[in-house]
Amino acid sequence: MDRRDLLRWSCAQCAVFSGLGAGVAHADTDSSGVPHPPWQPPARFSRPDLASDEGGLWALMDREETRMRRSPFRIRDAGLETYLKEITCRLAGGHCDDIRTYALRAPYFNAAMAPNGMMLIWSGLLLRTENEAQLGAVIGHEIAHYLQRHSVDRLRDVRGRAAFGQFMAMFGVVGLVGSLVAAAGAMAYSRDHEREADRIGVMLMRQAGYDARAAALVWSNLLEEITANPNADPTKNSVLFATHPPSAERRQTLEKLAAGSPSGDQGAEAFKTRMAAIRPMMLEDEIKRMRYAESIVLITRLIRSSTQDAHLLHYRGESHRLRLEAGDAEAALRDFEAALQTAAPLAITHRSLGYLYRTMGHPAKSSDHFSQYLSLSPEARDAELIKKELL
């Protein structure tokens, strides 16, 4: 898939998740130790008057949702959509019926919810979360933004046609990542909004029975990945961090909010089972981002819990092979050889070894692996191209 096409349809940023039913009577404290009063979620939202600013936004989102249903980048996997809906309903309670959940093929960590109830979950988020609790942490945080109407507050703060255009780009058709990050600035929540969403999001996780400690872990993992490149600026290179500024203080706050919570559900096995069918696609798309240092950090983390996963070993090897900095050829070779030793080796690993050995100046080994690839995948779309490598 062409990288530009992959990003063309992206109803974007982490804006507003809807939801909740039963109340949360837990009293938390802020950074100064002052207790917050018990928080109760609002009743289900009625459709706003079309003449209001919020009503107009709903109408625009209805139109975008119609386009989303037909989008070639919507992942049409009934089992996956059902699973995502189940997680959302577990957190959203009485608001469950107001939310329509779509999985979108876009290789960045992001989720978005429009005011009309259209929820998008990007495949890059699904790849980067390791269990249901981590996914629930992101959804819970965004549900909190929606319940507190933070996005509506932000919309009312927008002044001028250009600024409003930026706001709408968050939910409409946008092209390259740079455009997404620029548009994200229009949706940056205040520190008070973020603190409130963090606090309520952790409450929702506890109520749903999830392990609330997953929230801080998600943030820590993302920060480690996005700072893999020297002198990286997360706010300029990450769609997520354009609206959610990374900081050690934020991570520590999430850890504090989760402190004392019982060891809740991780949902690791259910999550792994549901993601198995689309994981190869997600890894392939991840490599196409061409941010190899970040991909290596990400896949290395995933390998820790799946040491014999042929896809993970293969695509980490591909990251090294394509980056090809000092030591990368050797690292790629180790990963490819390990991938071939797994219980279910991939034919494409032989193709990658063919290219790698050619780069390393070993034509005989290169031809041998290309031949093995063709033997295992005679109908591959690139078979004719690979045959030319044997001449």
Image (cartoon, helix red, strand yellow):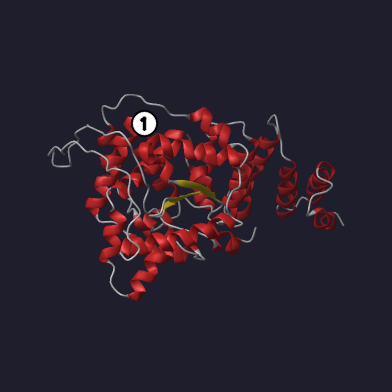
The percent position of residue 265, horizontal first and vertical second, equals 41, 27
Location of the N terminus by quadrant is bottom right
Q: Residues within 10 Å of mark 1 (few under 14, many from 20)?
A: many
Q: Pick the residue in front: 5 or 226.
A: 5
Residue 61, quarter of picture: bottom left
The percent position of residue 90, horizontal first and vertical second, equals 41, 34
Q: Pick the residue in front: 283 or 74.
A: 74
Q: Pick the residue in front: 116 or 228.
A: 116
Please name the residue that numbered disc 1 is placed on: 208
Q: In the drawing, does residue 141 fall left or right of residue 82?
A: left
Residue flagged by tag 1: what amino acid is it?
Ala
Q: Residue at x 45, y 36 (%)?
A: 87
Q: Residue at x 55, y 35 (%)?
A: 303
Does residue 212 appear in this view?
Answer: no
Q: Residue at x 56, y 54 (%)?
A: 69
Does residue 158 appear in this view?
Answer: yes
Q: Is residue 111 above or below residue 215?
A: below
Q: In the drawing, does residue 82 fall left or right of residue 214?
A: right
Q: Is residue 173 above or below residue 31?
A: below
The percent position of residue 37, horizontal first and vertical second, equals 15, 38
Toward the top, the furthest residue is 262
